[in-house]
Amino acid sequence: MKYNLTKLKNKAAKLRQETFNAFIRKGEAHLGGSFSMIEILITLYEIILRRNDKFILSKAHASFPLSLMLKKKGFNPKLTTHLEIDPKNGIHCTTGSLGHGLPIATGMAIAIKKKKKKRKIFVMISDGECQEGTTWESFLIASKHKLDNLVIIIDYNKIQALSKINDVLPLSSLKKKNRVI
Ligand SMILES: Cc1ncc(C[n+]2csc(CCOP(=O)(O)OP(=O)(O)O)c2C)c(N)n1
Ligand SMILES: [Mg+2]
């Protein structure tokens, strides 16, 4: 896999700046959760995703960097906090109410596995969403159905809105829990 790290870093810095400007313009919040996932987004869209793969942003309160990046790629998604389904513009389901993106992605992965299609579903969830029941149900279902076409990325930024994960509800040994599943 060939890539130019300096170019990728520059793209991330530019997207971070554009995200900040858009927040100022629109007067929106959730800057921390948006900034923490920018490098992951750049890596996915520049290196990892193949043509028929789908990416779902479950933590859609932080949708600005995704929408701004999709615009650069020729799509035209709405620039709003929370995402509304718009497949022709790269938004494959409605997300924003936390804990929903992963269950939807899991269902999509089961469907494409049954149809024996080669594509993969990538989904980014937040560490805050790991406190939710729907997330654990999805982990268990993905494991039972051996969903090797589902890639779950957890943005473990240790914050949730204005608090720290460890102060609200710690996720201790997240790695171990996932290994067991
Ligand atoms: C079901 C639900 N409850 C509450 C909210 C309000 N809310 C928006 S962001 C957020 C916490 C964000 O923290 P985290 O989920 O860890 O995402 P991060 O921004 O840190 O990536 C909350 C509680 C919501 N969007 N959905
Ligand atoms: Mg968080």
Image: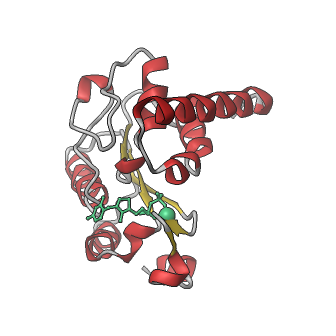
* In-image side of 42 versus 106 (left or right): right
Residue farthest to the top?
A: 74
- State the residue at coordinates (38%, 44%): 120
74 or 144, nearer to the observer: 74
Q: Quadrant of the C terminus?
A: bottom left
- State the residue at coordinates (48%, 36%): 23
- State the residue at coordinates (28%, 66%): 145
* Position above or below: 149 against 131: above
- State the residue at coordinates (22%, 30%): 86
Q: How many marks?
A: 0
Residue 70 placed where, x, y %? 43, 25
Residue 79 placed where, x, y %? 35, 29
Name the colour scheme: secondary structure
Q: Quadrant of residue 138?
A: bottom left
44 or 32, nearer to the observer: 32
* Position above or below: 70 against 118: above
* In-image side of 100 versus 45 (left or right): left
Residue 75 placed where, x, y %? 37, 19
142 or 164, nearer to the observer: 164
Q: Quadrant of the N terminus?
A: top right
Q: Quadrant of residue 98?
A: bottom left
* Position above or below: 134 against 38: below
Residue 154 placed where, x, y %? 49, 61
Residue farthest to the right?
A: 6
